[in-house]
């Protein structure tokens, strides 16, 4: 089973890290962004990687955990025109986007496919007691508190980590 991750910032990089540490190492992921100092508080990157592409650094970081894994990484900006083709060989897709317009593209373009989609909503703020998993269908899950938009609330490592761990948990239960 191959896991696809769209966007490897706070959610995507941490989901990938949790999966690899749990023995799931067949991953395909993409992102067009580079690492910034402000990312280090919640993403699976390091100071010496600032300025480098997230997708390539994530692959390198995952190899430090398990060098035998299949980490198919791409520098890509996802669009309606390329997202289906990019994830055509993946069984489960994780939404790691932080912008609503990209989340919409992922869900609208992939929802009718045979793929399982895990998206997140509400990862901002300090409080994590309202983080939950909503299973909309057998193939569509939402994880988060459903309210704390990152445009209104600062992001903190512990809450991003909890949401990413819950996403990874869903995948681990399906795969293992």
Image: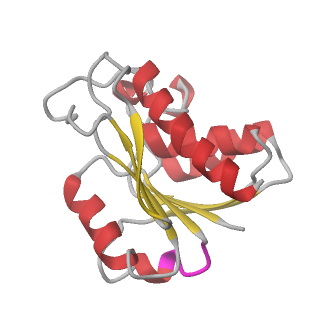
Task: Using the rendered view, name the quadrant where residue 69 is placed.
Answer: bottom right
Determine the residue located farthest toward the right in the rendered image. 68
Coloured how? secondary structure
Name which residue lies at 49% across and 46% down: 12
Observer-nearest of 144 and 38: 144
Q: Position of residue 24 (x, y in %)?
A: 75, 51
Observer-nearest of 79 and 119: 119
Is residue 70 in the magenta section?
Answer: no
Q: Is residue 89 left or right of residue 85?
A: right
142 in relation to 86, above or below: above
Name which residue lies at 29% across and 59% down: 103
Q: Position of residue 6 (x, y in %)?
A: 45, 59
173 in relation to 29, above or below: above
Name which residue lies at 45% across and 82% down: 113
Q: Is residue 30 left or right of residue 18?
A: left
Name which residue lies at 38% across and 25% down: 37
Determine the residue located farthest toward the left in the rendered image. 152
- Look at the image and tell me in which quarter the N terminus lies: bottom right
Q: Position of residue 45 (x, y in %)?
A: 54, 32
Please, what is the dominant secondary structure of the magenta stretch? loop
Q: Position of residue 49 (x, y in %)?
A: 53, 34
Observer-nearest of 127 and 68: 127
State whether residue 41 appears in this view. Answer: no
State whether residue 93 appears in this view. Answer: yes
Task: Tell me how many marks there are.
Answer: 0
Q: Which residues are magenta?
A: 86-90
């Amino acid at each position: 089973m191959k896991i696809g991750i769209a966007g490897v910032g706070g959610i995507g990089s941490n989901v990938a890290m949790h999966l690899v540490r749990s023995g799931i190492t067949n991953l395909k992921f993409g992102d067009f962004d580079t690492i910034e100092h402000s990312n280090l508080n919640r993403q699976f990157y390091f100071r010496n990687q600032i300025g480098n592409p997230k997708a390539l650094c994530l692959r390198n970081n995952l190899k430090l955990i398990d060098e035998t894994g299949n980490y198919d990484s791409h520098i890509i900006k996802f669009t309606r025109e390329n997202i289906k083709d990019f994830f055509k060989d993946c069984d489960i897709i994780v939404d790691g986007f932080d912008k609503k317009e990209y989340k919409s593209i992922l869900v609208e373009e992939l929802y009718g496919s045979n793929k399982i989609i895990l998206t997140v909503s509400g990862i901002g703020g300090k409080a994590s007691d309202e983080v939950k998993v909503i299973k909309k269908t057998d193939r569509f899950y939402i994880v988060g508190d459903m309210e704390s938009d990152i445009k209104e609330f600062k992001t903190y490592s512990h809450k991003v980590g909890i949401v990413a761990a819950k996403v990874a948990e869903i995948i681990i239960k399906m795969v293992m």
